[in-house]
Image (cartoon, rainbow, N blue to C red):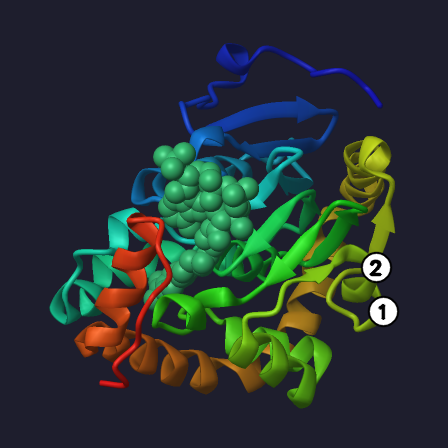
Amino acid sequence: MSAVSSSKAEQGMINEELIQVEFHDRVMLLRLSRPAALNALCKKLIQQLNAALDQAENDSRIGAIVVTGSEKAFAAGADIVEMRHLTFSDVTDKDFIHPWERLAQCEKPVLAAVSGYALGGGCELAMMCDIIYAGESAKFGQPEITIGTMPGAGGTQRLTQLIGKTKAMEMCLTGRIIQAKEAEQIGLVSRVYPDADLLKETLAAATKIAHFSAPVVRMIKEAIRHTTETELVGGIRFERRLFQSTFALEDRQEGMAAFAEKRPATFKHR
Ligand code: DAK
């Protein structure tokens, strides 16, 4: 794999705290970097991710984007500690919702390289990418139900589209976490590689794509998005409203408090 083509300063790019940016030939590599919280997707991280995506989209030298995390976690979900005290009106605010939509709106191809946990919003983030490659250690799940809420960034919709109704129901209703091999068998990920090879293989695929004609790449992505997203739009909006409603439940408060306090949740069904 070719080395970083020029310094970040030369490229005028950002390299802020929670997202590390590297350049590999025509590929921008974005590494989620919040190890102490297993890359939990706090507001600041999403803002920085979006800023980097904007840079990539506006730079004709970039033909593809790779999003990755650490060995232990791609991302363990939205930041529960940050969400814990939010109210219904906080989560209906457009500033809470809109930033999460940026990745799914990318016009350039985005590949996810997933090692370790990709849970909740982390799994949803991976599913917003166009191709998901997984390391053998990857674990996928939508465990929101265990903290008294539900997927809110497209999880119920994209998962159902990718793996079918009964498997999506099982993952979302039980919170079961699946391993990379199963994720590949059911169509959630494109390929599984040994962890040591994951990034190299993902960058190789991204580089290959980035050297094809950029307008043709864009048109193919647009065509595939047309069919998948036509089905998704209404469902994602509906899911979001239900997700927001969970913030009116005592069970949602209890679930998130229990996670933060490291104890089992006791749900009262209200
Ligand atoms: N949020 C905040 N902190 C987290 C976190 C998270 N999601 N996941 C892990 N951490 C923190 C832990 O609190 C711990 O912090 P310290 O205690 O050290 O300060 C540190 O990361 C290491 O975690 P553990 O000690 O728990 O590590 P283990 O190896 O024992 O366990 C685990 C790893 C991934 C199984 C466990 O951490 C875990 O269960 N994490 C939570 C997984 C989860 O429930 N994820 C779903 C979150 S809800 C929306 C957008 C997004 C969303 C919804 C709507 N809209 C725009 C509408 C998304 C919602 C979610 O993702």
Label 2 C-beta lies within 8 Å of the nearest ligand 1 atom: no
Residue where numbered disc 1 is placed = 185
Residue 101 placement (x, y as % from top left): 42, 60
**Residue 235 position within the rendered picture, expressed as x and y whole percent measured from the top left:** 46, 85
- The number of numbered badges drawn on the structure is 2
What residue sits 18% from the left and 64% below the top? 93
Task: Please name whichever residue, 212 or 193, is drawn nearer the observer in this view of the structure.
Answer: 193
Task: Give the image location of residue 129, x and y in percent.
Answer: 62, 56
Above-or-below relation of 235 to 176? below
Label 1, secondary structure: give it.
Answer: helix
Indicate the amino acid at tag 2. Lys
Check disc 1 and give the amino acid type: Gln
* Distance of label 1 from label 2 (alpha carbons): 6 Å
Q: Is residue 180 above or below residue 163?
A: above
Residue 73 appears at what percent x and percent y? 59, 41
**Residue bearing mark 2:** 181
Q: Is residue 125 above or below residue 17?
A: below
In depth, the one of 223 and 152 nearer the eye is 152
* Mark 2 surroundings within 10 Å by alpha-carbon count, few (fewer than 14), some (14 through 19), many (20 or more): some
Residue in the foreground of this view, choosing between 190 and 252: 252
State left or right for residue 94 relative to residue 186.
left
Q: Quadrant of the N terminus?
A: top right
Task: State whether residue 5 appears in this view.
Answer: yes
Instruction: Tell me the element at label 2.
Output: helix
Residue 227 in sight: no
Q: Which numbered dot is residue 233?
A: none
Along the line of sight, the residue nearer the viewer: 33 or 253:
253
**Residue at 43%, 68% in the rendered image:** 146
Res 229 quadrant in image: bottom right
Dots 1 and 2: beta carbons under 8 Å?
yes
- Quadrant (top left, top right, bottom left, bottom right) of the C terminus: bottom left
- Using a 10 Å C-alpha cutoff, classify the residue at mark 1 as few (fewer than 14 neighbours), some (14 to 19) or many (20 or more): few
